Image: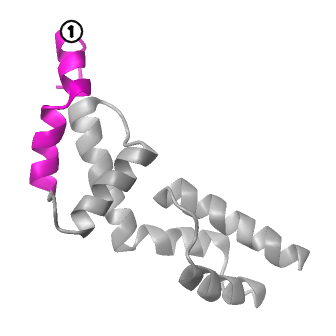
Amino acid sequence: MKKILSYLNKLNILYNKLLFRDIDPKGIKFYLLEIETKKITFEWIENNIKEGDEYKLRHKLDKLYKKILGREIDKYGYLNYTNLINKQLLNLEQLEKDLYTSGEFISKKLNGIDKIF
């Protein structure tokens, strides 16, 4: 039981690092059995997550944030924007416009912090 809790904790840490969220029941069911039977490693899981659509969207959002705001996307921005994108209420082009009109962008521009533009 301790081993399973340890695996689950490591999975949650990995998911939060890569996707800003806890592992879902589907992921637990798939990965725990495979880890326990030593069919996969945590390195394999990390690579598998990075090949997924959810991580690829995070990477695209990170690129936009770095380009426009000069920093990586934070957890709350990621969760908010992925929710809007997944519900088809926003696309990446609209997000880019939103970031260029954000208070953070305008504040940086007004304060002369424009090395990122």
Q: Is residue 7 left or right of residue 79?
A: right
Q: Percent x, y for residue 17?
A: 55, 54
Q: Identify the residue at the far right of this view.
A: 2
Residue 67 found in image quarter: top left
Q: Percent x, y for residue 72?
A: 38, 39
The residue positioned 86% from the left and 75% from the top of the image is 3
The secondary element bearing badge 1 is classed as: loop
> Height in image: 44 above or below 14?
below
The residue positioned 75% from the left and 72% from the top of the image is 7
Q: Is residue 109 left or right of residue 24?
A: left
> Height in image: 35 above or below 108?
below
Q: Which residues are magenta?
A: 92-117
**Would you call the spot at circle 1 few (<14 residues within 10 Å), some (14-19), or many (20 or more)?**
few
Q: Percent x, y for residue 94?
A: 10, 50
Query: Is the image coloured rainbow, by chain, by secondary structure, or in one colour?
Result: one colour
Predominant secondary structure in magenta? helix
Q: Which residue is mark 1?
A: 112
> Height in image: 108 above or below 20?
above
Residue 114 found in image quarter: top left
Residue 31 inside the magenta-drawn segment: no
Residue 115 inside the magenta-drawn segment: yes
Q: Quadrant of the C terminus?
A: top left
Q: Is residue 102 left or right of residue 30?
A: left
The residue positioned 58% from the left and 75% from the top of the image is 44
Q: Check disc 1 and give the amino acid type.
A: Gly
